[in-house]
Image: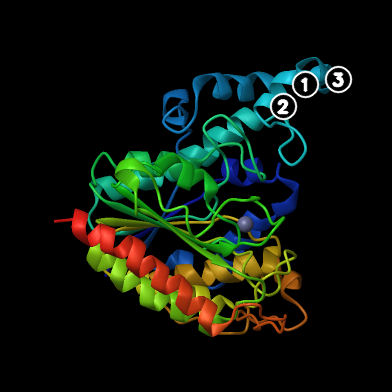
């Protein structure tokens, strides 16, 4: 049986509570995992992450940006207006405002995913989980969409010290634009993102089908732009036909999967109709390929549904079937009125036709899988 390591610590929880939209989410997740007694399982190990160093942050970001994050988190909020110009350059403000613990927040988030990646580098064929990482929008020197630093890019760079070919799969509702940008010219990191793609939807004008990579990376960036209201069947049919092709053409040595939970029907983003079962099925397909995996978190603004999904994924890694009735525990009231683990499929208008889904698969097959087949010898 594969060993599962799970990154968590009180410092990580405290840091995450600085982000208002996900406040308490990490506590709920860990508490639900404990309520189901998965923390007592013989094959899971809880690991406290180490703080990332400035050098480690610099594997994904420019040094001036890292220095500015540290600087701005230490000044008096009344003085922020003096640095407005620089804040605009680095996109600090609005969704990504400065706060007092910003510098340590970045180091804990980055440290969590780097510690997990390092563990995979040392062991063979295991599963590492950092649901408190997965901040996929941050760019080299810009904050974006609640993301100040990109722990995923750091983790992938760490994994590259051991593994030659890495497949990154982004299941979040939003396009994984920060990862795409970081590895757009690389044939060593295949990035795959399934996301909502509609005019005006964040990140705007990012994640189109034609963004397939450049130079050495041409063909190695796969975008699956989806419309509003996709359901479990369509999402799964796409994923199930894509993953075996990617696996045989690209032959990745390790998978990194961002398990954002904002695709679920109950998410305040009000976009897709998916259930936890659908996302679990996707993750299970990756687990069954029997290669090392780094599982990360991401979006998910219905915090109870997010805890439901991440607990379910943890049980999947441990091959444990969980009772649908949530056990009584400290955060039990968050799971009403049904107090069940599974989530309901939605009934939003589905704007994805069967022809559209088939068209996406055809495009990837002809323009990208073929390129990979010709390059990986
Ligand atoms: Zn998202």
Label 2 vs 3, first from the N-terminus: 3
Quadrant location, ligand no. 1: bottom right
Residue 144 at what x, y percent from top left? 64, 41
Which structural element holds mark 2? helix
Within-10-Å neighbours for mark 3: few <14, some 14–19, many 20+: few
Residue 371 visible in the picture: yes
Provide the residue designation for mark 3: 78
Most foreground residue, 207 or 327:
207
Q: CA distance from mark 1 to mark 2?
A: 6 Å
Which label number is shown at residue 365? none
Question: Which label sits in the foreground, 3 or 1?
Answer: 1
Residue 13 at what x, y percent from top left? 62, 47
Q: CA distance from mark 2 to mark 3?
A: 17 Å
User: Vertical placement of 43 versus 92: above or below?
Assistant: below
User: Vertical placement of 185 versus 265: above or below?
Assistant: above
- Say which quarter of the image contains residue 82: top right
Provide the residue designation for mark 1: 84
Q: Please identify the quadrant where the C terminus is shown.
A: bottom left
- Say which quarter of the image contains residue 345: bottom right
Image side of residue 52 versus residue 122, left or right: right
Label 3 vs 1, first from the N-terminus: 3
Provide the residue designation for mark 2: 88
Within-10-Å neighbours for mark 1: few <14, some 14–19, many 20+: some
Q: Please identify the quadrant where the N terminus is shown.
A: bottom left
User: Vertical placement of 38 versus 159: above or below?
Assistant: below
Which structural element holds mark 3? helix
Tags 1 and 2 touching, CB below 8 Å: yes
């Amino acid at each position: 049986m594969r060993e599962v390591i799970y990154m968590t610590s009180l410092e990580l929880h405290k840091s995450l509570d600085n982000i208002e939209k996900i406040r308490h989410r990490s506590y709920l997740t860990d508490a639900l995992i404990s309520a189901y007694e998965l923390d007592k399982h013989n094959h899971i190990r809880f690991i406290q992450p180490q703080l990332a160093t400035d050098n480690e942050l610099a594997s994904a970001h420019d040094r001036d940006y890292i220095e500015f994050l540290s600087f701005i988190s230490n000044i008096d909020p009344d003085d922020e207006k003096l640095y407005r110009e620089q804040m605009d350059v680095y996109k600090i403000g609005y969704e990504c405002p400065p706060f007092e613990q910003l510098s340590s927040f970045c180091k804990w988030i980055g440290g969590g995913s780097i510690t997990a990646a390092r563990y995979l580098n040392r062991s063979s064929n295991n599963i590492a989980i950092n649901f408190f990482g997965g901040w996929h929008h941050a760019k080299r020197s810009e904050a974006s969409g609640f993301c100040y630093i990109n722990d995923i890019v750091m983790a992938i760079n760490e994994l590259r010290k051991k593994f030659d070919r890495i497949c990154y799969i982004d299941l979040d509702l939003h396009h994984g634009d920060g990862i795409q940008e970081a590895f757009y010219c690389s044939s060593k990191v295949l990035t795959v993102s399934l996301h909502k793609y509609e005019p005006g939807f964040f990140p705007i004008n990012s994640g189109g089908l034609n963004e397939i990579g450049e130079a050495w990376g041409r063909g190695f960036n796969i975008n699956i732009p989806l419309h509003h209201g996709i359901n479990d069947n369509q999402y799964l049919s796409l994923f199930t036909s894509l993953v075996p092709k990617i696996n045989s053409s690209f032959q990745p040595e390790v998978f990194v999967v961002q398990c954002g939970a904002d695709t679920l029907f109950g998410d305040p983003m009000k976009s897709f109709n998916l259930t936890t079962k659908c996302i679990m099925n996707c993750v299970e397909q990756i687990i069954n390929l029997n290669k090392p995996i780094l599982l990360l978190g991401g979006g998910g603004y219905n915090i109870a549904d997010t805890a439901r999904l991440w607990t379910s994924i943890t049980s999947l890694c441990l091959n444990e079937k969980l009772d649908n009735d949530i056990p009584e525990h400290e955060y039990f009231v968050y799971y009403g009125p049904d107090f069940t683990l599974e989530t309901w499929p939605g009934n939003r208008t589905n704007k994805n036709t069967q022809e559209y889904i088939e068209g996406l698969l055809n495009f990837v097959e002809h323009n990208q899988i073929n390129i990979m087949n010709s390059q990986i010898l």
